[in-house]
Amino acid sequence: MQGIKKNVLITGVSRGLGYHISRQFLAEGHNVIGLSRSPLDDTVPLSTLKANVNFTYYQVDITNQQEVTKTLSDIYSSGITLDIVILNAGGIANDTQEGLDYANFAKIIELNFLSAMRIIGIVLPKFLERKSGVFVAISSVAAIRALSSSIGYPASKSALSMAFEGLRLHHSNCNIRFITVQPGFLAEKKPTLGTAYSKAATIIYKHIISKRKSEVISFPLSIVVLSQVSRLFPDKVVGKLLAKLLKFTKKT
């Protein structure tokens, strides 16, 4: 894949990791088709991306079936053949009020999980027809060990990771990759025990273009190990530690 210009669809490009992944692919000469709910001139990151001639933008609510279907139809009708789809869009909301705020819980599941599967449902037949393509799911280490601050977030990320595992198994004889990315804490500047967006984007880009055998990447190592080891301890103990760790990372 290295040296070959690719058409890369990325969701959630208006800020954060999606913006930095877009910059990484554009810097390497690839075409990026960016999706997000924000107007094109609404954020500084989007204004930066639109200055690149290889960047095409569609304002779309990926939780809306009709909007997603129309947008992808427009993309294919324009003559663009997608090579890579990076399902980055996601979010977190306070769904622990009064025990469980179901409305916020459902919004998280819709945005982080169902919207990704909706796009796969439309694009996968195209990949199967061509016998090539790459899907990348931006999951989280929260899929390894749940958070104490949200119910829906780790549930949605775990569902996304497991869905990709199922897709890999079901389509194991096809020339289609389903890469799962499980990062820890991310921020513009490197957080304690975390990764800066720019560094994470580089890790993800290199993994995609290198065609490495492992289709699941988790980082940074410190958080991955802590998440795995924490499963050996009672949830009540881990819950208290996670709450303290969350407060600490917010301060730093």
Image (tube, helix red, strand yellow):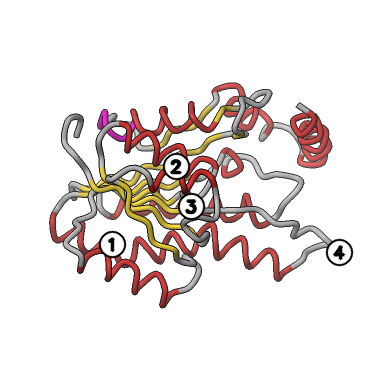
Q: Nearer the viewer, mark 4 or mark 2?
A: 2
**Foreground residue among 231 and 149:** 149
Residue at 19% x, 56% y is 81
Q: Return the x and y of residue 242 as percentages of the image width and height.
A: 77, 36
Q: Which quadrant holds residue 206?
A: top left
Element marked by disc 4: loop
Q: Which residue corresponds to mark 4?
A: 98
- Distance, label 4 to label 1, CA atoms, is 39 Å
Pointer 2: residues within 10 angstroms few (<14), some, or many (20+)?
Answer: few
> Which circle marks residue 37 in the picture?
none
Residue 8 within the magenta-colored segment of the rendering: no
* Identity of the residue drawn at 33% across and 46% down: 178
CA separation in Å, label 3 and label 2: 15 Å
Residue type (three-letter) at the residue carrying disc 3: Gly
Q: Nearer the viewer, mark 3 or mark 1?
A: 3
Give, as a single range, the part of the protein colored magenta: 207-211
Name the image quarter holding the N terminus. Answer: top left
Q: Quadrant of residue 58?
A: bottom left
Q: Which residue is mark 2?
A: 48
Is residue 134 toward the left or the right of residue 162 in the image? left
Query: In this picture, is 63 found above or below 55?
Result: below
Residue annotated with mark 1: 123
Separation (CA) of disc 3 from disc 4: 30 Å
The alpha-carbon separation of the residues under discs 4 and 2 comes to 41 Å
